[in-house]
Image (tube, rainbow, N blue to C red):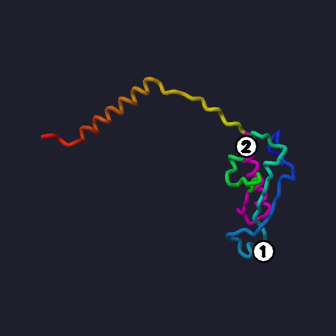
Amino acid sequence: MRINDQIEIADWELTESFTRASGPGGQNVNKVSTAVELRFEAERSPNLPPAVKARLKRLSGRRWTQDGAIVIFVQETRSQARNRDIARERLTELIQKACEKPKRRVATRPTKGSVRRRLQAKKERGEVKALRGKVDE
């Protein structure tokens, strides 16, 4: 499975298992195993750089297992082949997103004018609230 120019996933890294899907589908639901569970051994993959693995782990969330695999479960359609394609597409998108390096944040400071305006507005607002108190006779 080809992700981009540098990354290609071997077949041994992917494991697919099929189960019966829940939801609508008539008698088909009780007979045919259409739901797909795609398992990708990301931690042991020699094709992924360490930085991509770290970002992939963070992006995967609860789909990342203890032993370093990503599990994607799809039961959207009645077709096993279509569910299989959807699962592979989701894995591809996830890895492509992990390949993008996040931009480094550049720390900035507010301008003197904006600080002065903010403090002036706070002062005016405080004066308005102070005038709401009880009136002395």
Viewer-closest of 47 and 24: 47
Q: Mark 2: which amino acid?
A: Ala
Query: For the view shown, which residue lies furthest in the top direction?
Result: 112
Q: In this view, does 84 lie above or below 20?
A: above
Check disc 1: other Cα within 10 Å, few if <14, some if 14-19, many if 20+. Answer: few
Q: Which mark is residue 54?
A: 2
Q: Could you tell me what secondary structure mostly forms the magenta stretch?
A: helix
Query: For the view shown, which residue lies furthest in the left direction?
Result: 137
Whether residue 96 sits left or right of residue 131 in the image: it is right
Q: Mark 1: which amino acid?
A: Lys
Task: Report how many numbered discs are placed on residues in the image.
Answer: 2
Instruction: Name which quarter of the figure residue 99 lies in.
Output: top right
Do labels 2 and 1 touch, CB within 8 Å? no
Q: Which of marks 2 and 1 is nearer the N terminus?
A: 1
| x and y, in percent, of residue 10 in the image | 87, 49
**What residue is shown with label 1?**
31
Instruction: Name which quarter of the figure residue 35 lies in.
Output: bottom right
* First to last magenta residue range: 72-99
Mark 2 secondary-structure assignment: helix
Q: In this view, does 31 lie above or below 71?
A: below
Inspect the magenta stretch and tell me whether residue 83 lies in it.
yes
| x and y, in percent, of residue 16 in the image | 81, 60
Mark 1 secondary-structure assignment: helix
Q: Is residue 53 above or below residue 13?
A: above
